Amino acid sequence: EEMSFEQRLKKAKTGFHKKRTAENPKDLMEKKERQLQKVNKGRKKVGMPKERYSKIPVKDKMMSTFQAQEKGRDPRFLAGDASQFNKGLFEASYNFINDMTKDRKKNIKRELNALKKKTRKNKKLSPAELETQEKLTNILAEESNLIKVYSKSNPESKYLKEAKKMNKERAKKGQNPIYYKKRELKEMRYKEQFDKLDKKKGRVDKEIQKAFRKV
């Protein structure tokens, strides 16, 4: 049967409408799900991809499940913080260690003197006392070495502290502060060393001879 023009027009309209409705997002999602089901049925292994890589849509934003681990920060090993090291503050905060070593040295000396007094009175020391004496002498040597190392590492610290105290007093009086140069601090240190040697007879000549030998 031949269709009339009106019937043909109606049929064309309904076909166009169906085509438009098929392009709706809901219909597209359903179509995609059906395609995925077909692909899953055809998979031979569990490890095979569910969908072809070329058809996977690229996401705009991907939320990462990776959590960054917190790294430990030690300012001693950071190059940027090296310039911020305050030597004076460090010495002031950890000066108690030097005081503790000095106190320990005094206590050890007392104990050793007590043991020496026993030997002077012609009293024999027991094996335990001899062992303690040996231990104490070793500890005393270690403590004295620590004090020497500290004094060598900060030879001018004593004079700088004295200068700070003096400058505070001068500021109270309205006077200008005095700042010592490195050369002046060295001269003060050497003068003090020389004065100590001068008290002990013959020590000055020995020290001069030692210096010549080193040269």
Image (cartoon, grey):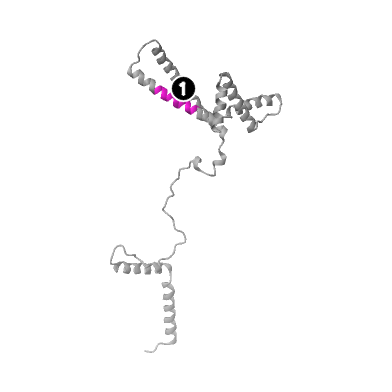
- Residue 53's place in the image compared with 62, above or below, is below
Pick the residue in front: 45 or 146: 146
Q: Is 128 placed left or right of 198 in the picture?
A: left
**Among all residues in the image, which is located at the extreme bottom?**
2
Q: Position of residue 25 (x, y in %)?
A: 43, 67
Pick the residue in front: 185 or 170: 185
Q: Is 132 placed left or right of 143 in the picture?
A: left
Q: Position of residue 165 (x, y in %)?
A: 63, 25
Question: Is residue 92 in view from this perspective?
Answer: no
Element type where label 1 sits in the image: helix
Say which residue appears at 43% left-offset and 72% top-offset.
23
Q: Is 167 placed left or right of 210 in the picture?
A: right
Say which residue appears at 42% left-offset and 78% top-offset.
15
Is residue 145 shown in magenta?
A: yes
- The C terminus, quarter of image: top right
Q: How many marks?
A: 1
Q: Which residues are magenta?
A: 135-147
- Main SS of the magenta part reads helix
Q: Position of residue 208 (x, y in %)?
A: 57, 27
Q: Which residue is mark 1?
A: 105
Say which residue appears at 57% left-offset and 32% top-offset.
88
Q: Position of residue 20 (x, y in %)?
A: 44, 74
Q: Amino acid at mark 1?
A: Lys
